[in-house]
């Protein structure tokens, strides 16, 4: 049985798990070969390694598309930015897709000021991140 892209929506979760570490909550919803990571809290020097490890684990499990939903992040520092750059680089080198959605408030400003939209694909609307709609600038 072949899965269609529509079968891989957030509405049909195969697994749903939550990781809590150093002020960061990562809720991962895996559907087929796609995973959405909903981040809440702070992405900083203490929590960035946990996010990177989580993303690497999903990559090794064969997830071809990872969507990082930053809507719940209240803070990101340079270590958090470096973690995003590293996973974007890994995605490009390994051939899997990384999409970033919902950067808001101070997190959105930091991504804009640091020109992160040139490093990874950013979608303003999380629903578009699952489609082939081109990204919007931050």
Image: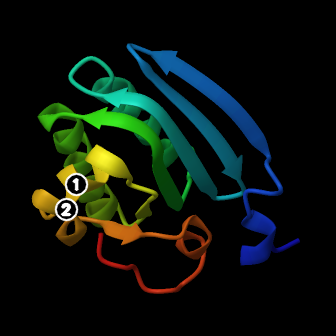
Image position of 84 with respect to 128: above or below = above
- Residue in the picture at 35% in, 28% down: 42
- CB within 8 Å, label 2 to label 1: yes
Q: Does the rendering let one see residue 91? A: yes
Pick the quarter of the image with the C terminus: bottom left
Q: Nearer the viewer, residue 19 or 64?
A: 19
Residue 49 position within the rendered picture, expressed as x and y whole percent measured from the top left: 30, 25
Number of other residues with Cα within 10 Å of mark 1, as a class: few under 14, some 14 to 19, many 20 or more: few
Q: Does the rendering let one see residue 4? A: no
Residue farthest to the right?
Answer: 1
* Colour setup of the view: rainbow
Which quadrant of the view contains residue 95? bottom left
Which quadrant of the view contains residue 98? bottom left
Q: Which residue is mark 1?
A: 109
Residue 101 position within the rendered picture, expressed as x and y whole percent measured from the top left: 45, 60
Residue 83 position within the rendered picture, expressed as x and y whole percent measured from the top left: 24, 40
Mark 2 and mark 1: span between their CA atoms? 5 Å
Residue 124 position within the rendered picture, expressed as x and y whole percent measured from the top left: 45, 69
Which quadrant of the view contains residue 118? bottom left
Q: Which residue is mark 2?
A: 112
């Amino acid at each position: 049985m072949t899965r269609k892209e529509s079968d891989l929506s957030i509405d049909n979760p195969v697994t749903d798990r939550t990781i809590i570490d150093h002020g960061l909550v990562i809720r991962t919803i895996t559907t087929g070969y796609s995973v959405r990571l909903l981040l809440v809290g702070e992405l900083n020097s203490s929590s960035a390694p946990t996010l990177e490890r989580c993303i690497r684990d999903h990559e090794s499990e064969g997830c071809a598309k990872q969507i990082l939903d930053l809507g719940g992040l209240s803070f990101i520092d340079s270590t958090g930015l470096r973690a995003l750059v590293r996973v974007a680089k890994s995605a490009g080198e390994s051939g899997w897709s990384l999409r970033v959605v919902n950067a808001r408030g101070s997190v959105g400003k930091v991504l804009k000021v640091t020109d992160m939209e040139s490093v990874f694909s950013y979608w303003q609307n999380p629903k578009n991140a699952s489609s082939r709609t081109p990204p919007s600038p931050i």
